Image (cartoon, coloured by chain):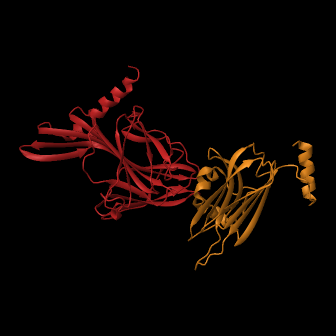
Chain colours: A orange, B red
Amino acid sequence: MTFAKKRLLSLLLGCGLALPTLAADLAVEVEIPRLNVAEYHRPYVAVWVERADNSIAAHLAVLYDAKMKNGEGTKWLKDLRQWWRRGGRDLAMPVDGITGATPTVGKQKLRFAQGKAPLGDLPPGDYKLGIEAAREVGGRELLYIPFQWPPKQAQQATAQGQSELGHITLDLKP
Amino acid sequence: MKLLRPLTIAALLAAALVPAAQAHNAWLLPSSTVLSKAQWITVDAAVANDLFFFNHNALNLDNLSVTAPDGSKVAPENLAKGKLRSVFDLNLTQAGTYRVAVVNAGIMASFKLKGEPKRWRGSAEAFAREIPAEAEELNVNEMAGRNETFVTVGKPSALAPIGKGLELVPVTHPNDLVNGEAATFQMLLDGKPAAGLEVTVTKGATRYRNQLGEMKQKTGADGKFSVTFPEAGMYWLDAELKDSKTSVKAAKERRVTYAATLEVLPQ
C-alpha cells in the first residue's frame, strides 16, 4: 500500500465510513468466562502474533492494571508467562495502542489492520495468534490459533478455552 | 585422528574426575526468579539433603556475594541465621539478571602438634602464617566452592564468567527455563571448558517421592551439556571435581564444587 492510500484509508476510517477493504484485516474476539469463585479479579490478558520461530511479530493487546500508581500493576505481567518470555519482557510498559484495562466478563472484540499499529506490516508467512490469561488468586490459560498471512479469502478459526478463557474467534479478511 | 582428539582429551579429563562425595547438600532458595517489576525478594539458605526442605543446618552466609546487572554489589538486608536456615532480603532495583552466590574457598589442614591432633581451616594466605613449623603428619587439602542462584527483573541480561573455580555459563539463560524445552549450559573450570564433567540435576520436593530421580549428564569437550526439565519446579544442579591445581604447595588436592538452584516454569 502506498503512503497516499494509507493516508486515504486512515482519513476514511477517521470519518467512520464503511470501506471496501484495501488491506488485510485481523479481528479477534476474546471471551472472558464468568467464573463462580468467591474472590474474583479480572484477568490479565495478552494477545500477540507469534512467528514460527516463537518470536513475537506483533504485540496486539496487553490488558492489565495499567492505572495502578507507580506502575504497581506491572508486577504481575510475568504471570502471562508465555507472552512474557516470548517478548513481553522486552517492552517498556505501558505501550500506546497495546495496553488497556483488564477485561470484564463477556466478549471483547479487537480489530487490527495490516499496515497499522499495532499489527504493522506483517510479512507473508505462517503465524500463530497467542492468547494468554492469568488471574490473581486464579489460574492461567494459554491458547494458540495458527493462521497464514495474508489470508487468501475470508476465514474464521476458533479455539476453546477451558478455564480462564472462553471461546476465541479469529476472523481474517483479505 | 582429527575426530578422536577431543574425545581422548575428554576421556583423560574424565579419568581425573571423582564422583560426587556424599555430603549434605547446600542450597539457596529464592522466593522468585522471574520478575516483571523491580521489587524485593527473599532468599532462604540451608544445608540439607532434602531439596528444598530445612531440616538440617542453616547455611553460613559469611561469603555471600550478590551482584547486580551492572556489576555492582548489592547488600543483603535482614540477614538472619536460624537453627535450620539462614535468610536474607534483596531489594532488586535494576532491570536485568542478579547473581546471588556463596563462594567458599580455603585450605583445610590436619596435623599433630606434640602428638596432639589438630585441625585448621583458613585462607591460603593465613595458611603459611598460622601452621606451626613443628607440625607433624601435616595433611593439607584445598577447596573452592560456588553455590548460586539467579534472579531476573525484566529482560534477562548476560552473566559475565567469573573465571575462577567451577561455574555454570549460560547458553540458555538460567531465568528462561520452561518444562519440556532443552536448556544448554557450559561448565567452566578456572575459565576454561570443563570437559567430561558429570553434572547432576535434581528436582525439588524430594520429600514427596520415593526416588530421587537425578538426571546426570556429562559435559562435552566444549564443557557444554543439555538438560530437558520434565516438569516445572525448583531444581538443584551440582557438579564436583578434584584436581591438583592448589594455591599452596603443601596441599595435595583441590576439591572444586558447584551448585545452582534453577527455577523451571510451566509452558
Farthest residue, direction left = B115
Image-based side of B178 in relation to B88, left or right: right
Image-based side of B158 in relation to B87, left or right: right
Instruction: Please tell me which residue is depicted at 18% across the width and 40% down the height of the picture.
Output: B131
Image-based side of A112 in relation to B132, left or right: right
x%, y% of residue B15?
27, 33
Res B107 seen here: yes
Q: Nearer the viewer, residue B90 or B11?
A: B11
Farthest residue, direction bottom = A38
Farthest residue, direction top = B1
The C terminus of chain B - image quarter: bottom right
x%, y% of residue B146?
36, 45
Q: Nearer the viewer, residue B97 or A14?
A: A14
The N terminus of chain B - image quarter: top left
- A124 versus B247 height, above or below: below
Res A102 seen here: no
- Which quadrant of the figure has residue A105? bottom right
- Which quadrant of the figure has residue B128? top left
Instruction: Please tell me which residue is depicted at 36% across the width and 54% down the height of the picture.
Output: B27
- B6 versus B115 height, above or below: above
x%, y% of residue A19?
92, 56
Q: Nearer the viewer, residue A152 or A65?
A: A152
x%, y% of residue B259?
37, 48
Q: Nearer the viewer, residue A109 or A98?
A: A109
How many numbered discs, if any? 0
Instruction: Please tell me which residue is depicted at 66% across the width and 75% down the height of the picture.
Output: A34
